[in-house]
Amino acid sequence: LGKQIHYFTDVHSTNNEAKRIAMADAPEGTIVVAEAQNRGRGRMSRGWFSPFAKGIWFSVILRPPFSPAEAPKCTLMAAVAVSSAIQQVTGVACGIKWPNDILYQGKKIVGILTEMSAEIDVINYIVIGIGINVNIGQEEFPAEISGLSTSLAIEAGRKISRLDLLTAILQQLESLYTGVLANGFASVLGEWRSHSITLGQNVEVLGGTGNFTGIAVDIDNDGALLIQTGSGVEKVLAGDVSIRPR
Ligand code: BTN
């Protein structure tokens, strides 16, 4: 990964650029990285705060030989790679909230937005967009997200090298992806479970196939969240989870 890097000082969204160059046949592993995004995008049509030189805002193009149904697991793989690299470089032990938010003590540090182009049975490309709050001060976050967000510098108590962290993430991601291509997703799903802060919690899920409240009991082999509700186990492939006190 990262043999080809497209670097921007300012861009609308690295995911948009990555999709554009993926359609123009950019090879697998191409990275798009920007110092700032002026229209950074989050999940559920939200924006993503991406100030200049304060975070890592980047996208990776993958072309996995999988069916589109396997795409969610690529996102889980990215979440595992990022949280392991964060632990290694900063010592901050984050947790993953299903499917792919990385939090520290309930506050968001990393968001991941995966977008895909596929035919019926093959993936053409997947763009995995990753946004990491690295050296943002608490008072710099916009008021509407300040209470929900934190950064690695805040939690580690020191400035973090974005280059060291990006390097570690690409190394982790490449090694996980190589493992997945050779042996499937089982070990990634296992690592995801061990980093999860969602499993065992009382949760409310909005989205996809409906709204559910219950206990998050596991993720299955598709990466779907399994929720024990009053009327049985519901399988949720996409949506927004909130963890509720019991
Ligand atoms: C979320 O938690 O809602 C996902 C946020 C994803 C943000 C990253 S930053 C790099 C890439 N480009 C974007 O426009 N979004 C993703």
Image (cartoon, helix red, strand yellow):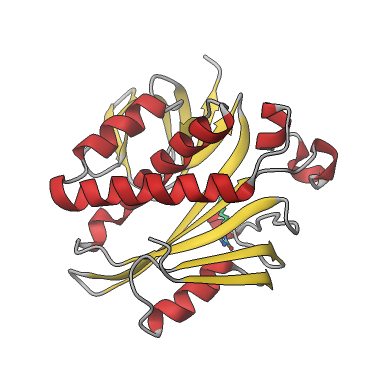
Q: Residue at x 14, y 45 (%)?
A: 183
Residue that extends furthest to the bottom in the rendered view of this protein: 24
Q: Where is residue 149 in the image (x, y as percent from the top left)?
A: 69, 38
How many marks on residues?
A: 0
**Vertical relation: 64 (above or below) 183:** below
Question: Ligand 1 sits in which quadrant?
Answer: bottom right
Q: Position of residue 99 (x, y in %)?
A: 42, 41
The answer to whether 33 appears left or right of 3 in the picture is right
Q: Residue at x 57, y 27 (%)?
A: 92
Q: Which residue is drawn at 41% across and 28% down?
A: 196
Q: Residue at x 27, y 36 (%)?
A: 189
Any part of residue 209 in sight: no
- The quadrant in which residue 60 appears is bottom left
**Vertical relation: 76 (above or below) 214:** below
Residue that extends furthest to the top in the rendered view of this protein: 246
Seen from the viewer's position, the closer of residues 47 and 3 is: 3
Seen from the viewer's position, the closer of residues 76 and 157 is: 157
Q: Where is residue 129 in the image (x, y as percent from the top left)?
A: 50, 58
Residue that extends furthest to the right in the rendered view of this protein: 139
Q: Where is residue 69 in the image (x, y as percent from the top left)?
A: 24, 57
**Vertical relation: 39 (above or below) 153:** below
- The quadrant in which residue 150 appears is top right
Any part of residue 94 in sight: yes
Seen from the viewer's position, the closer of residues 11 and 75 is: 11
Quarter in which the N terminus is drawn: bottom left
